[in-house]
Image: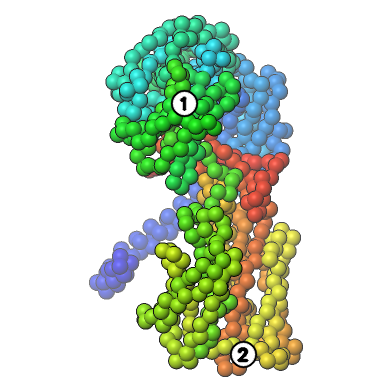
Amino acid sequence: MKKILYIFLLLMMIGCGKEPETEKTVEKSQNLVEQTIKEEQTQEIKGLEIVSIKTNSDDEPRIDIEFSQELEGENLDAFVKISPETSYKILKDKNRILVIGNFKIGEVYNVEILKNIKDKNGRVLKENYKKSVSFREIEPKLSFSNDGIILPSINNKKIAFKSINVKKVSVKIKKIYENNFTQFLQDFVFKGNGNIFDYQVEDNLYKVGDVVFEKDYDLNYEKNIWHQNEIELENFLDNKGLFLLEISFDENGIDYIFPENIESWQKYSLIRNNGRIGKAILLSNVGIIAQKDREKTSIIPMDILKNNPIENAKVKIISTNNQVLAEGVTDSKGEFLFQNNDKMMYALVENGEEKSILKFEDSRLSYDGFAVGGAFSSNGVKNFIYTDRGIYRPGDEIYLSMIIRNDKGDFPDNHPLKINVYSPRGKKVVDDEVIKDGKGGFYTWKFKTDLDSETGIWKIEVQVGDRKFVKDISVETIVPYKIKVETDIPEKIDLKENEKLNVSVKSDYLFGALANDLKYSVELDVREKEINFEKYQNYNFKNPTSYSYYYQDYKDGVLDTNGKGEIIFDVKRIAPQNINLTGIITTRVIETGGRPVIEKDIVSLNKFDTYVGIEFPKDRYIKTGDKINLQVVAVSEDGKTLVPDRKLKYRVYKNEYS
């Protein structure tokens, strides 16, 4: 609309003698074009540039060299010099060079980038570039050595954690009272990685427990090296139950020189994010295994020291509103069964003085790698009904077969069944016919439709005792085809080795003659292959940086005197480089009356024999500084087996919002 109005106004100005204004517009456009050309020429003159050189002092110290354009080639070692000499390796990542080596913290290194290094467009660095860099100290940090939350007596109440540039820590333990478990667990998530603190949890801690242990510990450490620590809670051996452990440091407990001109809030943020970890710990010799099926859950308390199920252990199932949903003791096998309930929150187990809890929501194991799909078996009688055909015409005889089983997996011979048949309009055509001639739960029955019977979906109802089973039958007026169509197409094409896709077509009349000289067509529709493996439902195998691809080709011809034809598609024209594809081939042979007989086939168009999947994160949002542990799998094309020894390249993208 704006374009139309602009043209209209332009015509009006021309009609009113406004030619000078038009000339100014043309002049302005010409100036813009000239300016754009000059900018491109200036960029060409400038050549390749170095944007920045930075250092990173993490676990693997490295120097990041960023260029203005993506670099050409892989072997760039000859263009980078580092002094004083040290061992290092060079990696290329698009427009960056990563120099990873045995760099020492605090030492100054001279980095020289030699001229004539090229980018993808052939532009070169015109002069040598030199810069001196140094590696800052690694920020002080704490981390638990493992994710475990149960601390049995065999461990002598020892807490293991790692630290770097930390010389002193404070350990605080808060006991969570049993009558406050439900309130505490409403917001608390059992994590063993140390990231348990958020505002909601911290605000409620004083309501659910008290501090029962607090002590400072001096640590043995080496500068800028991760150190393994163990703290023994010597005065805490006789305590049992659920506790909240917190390990922290303050500014006086670290060996670290803050950067110059750092703001006070930045110091506070660093110490808060890096200097405080926590986890819930159960001081107990009892672990809990829970197994849930469709209707019931099994609780099995385990003696951690003996690795045996515990008999006669007391079990309570507590709801989200702090009500006891089920209660009892374990049987001789150490198992307690109870009916599932939507409100069940956690299990509390007592064995003498030992207590343990299991929060159901936080303790689910991943099903990835296991085919756990399928239908649940219903209680009582099961009936599988099938027919000899999928569709019938009016006047046809319909043959029905039934296989019936009870809970025990068998069925009594000659047990009576009752059958009703309903037409598409709901009229009862067969009324309560009883059949008894069944052997081993296998029954057969037939009935005949009339030539003038209604077309549509007929319903056959089979009643076994008080259970009713329904089978839909399609009855339609069908004009049969005169010809049959056969195609010969490969199931899979390797696009790296094949440039052609051959489609062979053959057609015969149903009464035996060759279907020669008939017109036919073949259509190829190509789209991205949908990846959904039963064993890896929680993994993403799609590349989010690739676009949705669609390609179509069409060819036609005439069958020869033998009723045969052949079409060749040029598959090298299919463009995507990073995805496998599916080709849907639709073949149509036209009968003499003009009606097409259609045959559909599917062909896999592959460039890769392995798929890489990344596990979906459990939480969409994470706190700054938290670690994300995502599993990565490489699986075969059918998704059934894991593929070892494949080299993977990782890229992490950051979304920027303007």
Q: Is residue 615 among the parts visible in the rendering?
A: yes
In the rendered image, residue 598, in percent from the top left (x then y), is placed at 59, 80
Residue at figure coordinates x 54%, y 11% from the top left: 156
In the rendered image, residue 125, in percent from the top left (x then y), is placed at 63, 38
Along the line of sight, the residue nearer the viewer: 501 or 206: 206
Question: Helix, strand or loop at disc 2?
Answer: loop
Name the residue tied to disc 1.
313
Left or right of residue 507: residue 284: left
The quadrant in which the C terminus is found is top left
Along the line of sight, the residue nearer the viewer: 113 or 205: 205
Q: Nearer the viewer, mark 1 or mark 2?
A: 1
Label 2 environment density (alpha carbons within 10 Å; few <14, some 14–19, many ≥20): some
In the rendered image, residue 620, in percent from the top left (x then y), is placed at 42, 40
Q: Is residue 573 among the parts visible in the rendering?
A: no
Res 177 → quadrant: top left
Left or right of residue 487: residue 530: left
**Relative height, residue 55 to residue 254 (above, below):** below
**Relative height, residue 308 to residue 490 (above, below):** above
Residue at figure coordinates x 35%, y 25% from the top left: 181
Amino acid at circle 2: Lys
Res 274 → quadrant: top left
Question: Helix, strand or loop at disc 1?
Answer: loop
- Please count the marks in the image: 2
Residue at figure coordinates x 54%, y 43% from the top left: 367
Residue extending furthest toward the left: 16
Along the line of sight, the residue nearer the viewer: 274 or 446: 446
Name the residue tied to disc 2.
482
Sequence-wise, the earlier of marks 1 and 2 is: 1
Q: How is the image coloured?
A: rainbow
